[in-house]
């Protein structure tokens, strides 16, 4: 066995002699590279077949072994913990030192020093902050530490500074300025494992976990078409024409246009504009500004061959979009139906001024994205040799809202 021979350790206390026998038989399989390549245990069903026992018994034995540190879970995979003659503990084929405790750096803007807010400070399920909470929950459940890093504080840091932090890996959960992109590229070349939720050109060389924006837009478009809406307008407020578009928005366009094409319908050009900066102290004042701004942009769209449905960029834009349609004399949803994105309609502050809900939205499962980022990072750390960057696209769900 790499690194030395196994040290005989007392068995964990089992409830029956038969379970002790099963434990010894299972331990004998852990060193078999054909059964457990790199120490990774096969699925419960396979173990049940190899040991000629039920899956329920397999779960009991595995739980006992995990409780006593004989196996660990990394990225959703069970891996054998091996003890060498010098006392070093490692999992699979990669030495991890005497402790499995890790420190993961999380780059996130405006975290105010807290990885998790107090429970009374509720954060909407659709909020992007839920990604950070998913990261924190996944790491803390494994007993690992989180080092929060502000992008602004990293701009003047060299890659040697990152190395000095003795981080096991980095998770990037926010957009970062160009200076940080250079730093991350250097860290990646230096062998750092980096996982990001950003799907932009700079992140292509890194491991990525991103929501399926294309699938979400496709589902929304298909939903509208099934309800006899044929003239669908994409209302991309907050995106300026002539500037680099975010990759996730391009993916939404692809999904929408594919659904329209499959229905033999013509996709209209998206209406894009840069949104003004919110400098209002009161929510109602900002709502009024957006309502009239949106009405100005929508007026031309309604002059000829008016749309019968509007896809808003996010649920937060829906109240002002509906109010703008009413200013233009359109009934919602009779004349024009509205759908959103991100599934946080229940928490949109402006809904108090325009309570008509969108027909549907899309849940990106942000908390799951954060947890998946941790799982991907830990699975990469357990690899004996580096592999090409991985892309995991997380499934989104269409949410039909009550009228």
Image (cartoon, rainbow, N blue to C red):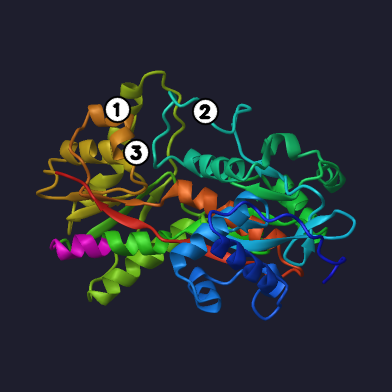
Q: Is residue 223 magenta?
A: yes
**Measured Cα–Cα span from mark 2 to mark 1:** 31 Å
Q: Residue at x 62, y 45 (%)?
A: 142
Q: Are marks 2 and 3 in contact (CB under 8 Å)?
A: no
**Nearer to me, 133 or 327:** 133
Q: Residues within 10 Å of mark 3 (few under 14, many from 20)?
A: many
**Nearer to me, 30 or 266:** 30
Residue 222 visible, this angle = yes
Give the image location of residue 244, x and y in percent: 55, 55
User: Which segment did they paint magenta?
Assistant: 221-228
**Which element carries disc 1, helix, strand or loop?**
helix
Q: Residue at x 29, y 27 (%)?
A: 288
Sequence order check, earlier mark of 3 and 1: 1
- Frontmost of labels 2 and 1 is 2
The quadrant in which residue 396 appears is bottom left
**Which element carries disc 3, helix, strand or loop?**
helix
Q: Residue at x 50, y 52 (%)?
A: 369
**Which element carries disc 2, helix, strand or loop?**
loop
The answer to whether 187 is drawn above or below residue 259 in the figure is: above
Q: Residue furthest top?
A: 281
- Frontmost of labels 3 and 1 is 3
Q: Residue 152's mark?
A: none
Where, quadrant-wise, is the C terminus in this rendering?
top left
Q: Are marks 2 and 1 in contact (CB under 8 Å)?
A: no
Q: Main secondary structure of the magenta part?
A: helix
**Measured Cα–Cα span from mark 3 to mark 1:** 14 Å
Q: Which residue is mark 1?
A: 288
Q: Residue 117's mark?
A: 2
Sequence order check, earlier mark of 2 and 1: 2
Q: Which residue is mark 3?
A: 316
């Amino acid at each position: 066995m790499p690194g030395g021979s196994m040290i005989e350790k007392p068995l964990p206390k089992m409830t029956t002699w038969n379970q002790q026998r099963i434990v010894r038989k299972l331990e004998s399989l852990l060193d078999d590279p054909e059964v457990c390549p790199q120490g990774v245990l096969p699925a419960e069903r396979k173990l049940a077949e190899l040991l000629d026992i039920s899956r329920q018994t397999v779960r009991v034995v595995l739980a006992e072994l995990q409780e006593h540190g004989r196996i660990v879970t990394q990225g959703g995979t069970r891996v054998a913990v091996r003890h060498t003659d010098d006392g070093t503990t490692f999992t699979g084929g990669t030495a991890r030192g005497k402790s499995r405790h890790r420190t993961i750096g999380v780059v996130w803007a405006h975290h105010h020093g807290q990885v998790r807010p107090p429970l009374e400070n509720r954060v909407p399920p659709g909020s992007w902050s839920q990604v950070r909470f998913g990261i924190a929950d996944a790491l803390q459940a494994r007993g690992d530490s989180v080092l929060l890093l502000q992008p602004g504080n990293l701009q003047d840091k060299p890659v040697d500074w990152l190395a000095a932090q003795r981080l096991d890996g980095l998770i990037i959960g926010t957009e970062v300025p160009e200076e940080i992109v250079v730093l991350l590229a250097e860290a990646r070349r230096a062998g750092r494992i980096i996982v990001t939720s950003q799907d932009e050109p700079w992140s292509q060389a890194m491991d990525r976990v991103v929501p399926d924006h294309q699938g979400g837009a496709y589902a929304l478009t298909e939903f509208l078409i099934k309800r006899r809406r044929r003239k669908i307008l994409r209302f991309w407020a907050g995106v300026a024409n002539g500037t680099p578009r975010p990759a996730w928005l391009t993916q939404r366009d692809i999904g929408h246009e594919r659904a329209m094409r499959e229905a033999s319908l013509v996709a209209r050009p998206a209406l894009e504009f840069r949104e003004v900066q919110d400098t209002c102290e009161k929510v109602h004042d900002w709502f009024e500004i957006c309502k009239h701004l949106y009405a100005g942009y929508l007026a031309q769209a309604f002059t000829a061959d008016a749309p019968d449905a509007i896809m808003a960029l996010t649920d937060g834009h829906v109240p002002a979009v509906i109010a703008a349609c009413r200013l233009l004399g359109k009934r919602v949803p009779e004349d024009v139906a509205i759908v959103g994105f991100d599934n946080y309609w229940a928490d949109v502050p402006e809904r108090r001024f325009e309570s008509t809900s969108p027909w549907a939205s899309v849940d990106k499962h942000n908390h799951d994205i954060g947890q998946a980022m941790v799982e991907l990072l830990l699975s990469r750390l357990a690899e004996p040799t580096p592999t090409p960057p991985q892309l995991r696209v997380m499934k989104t769900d269409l949410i039909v809202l009550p009228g």
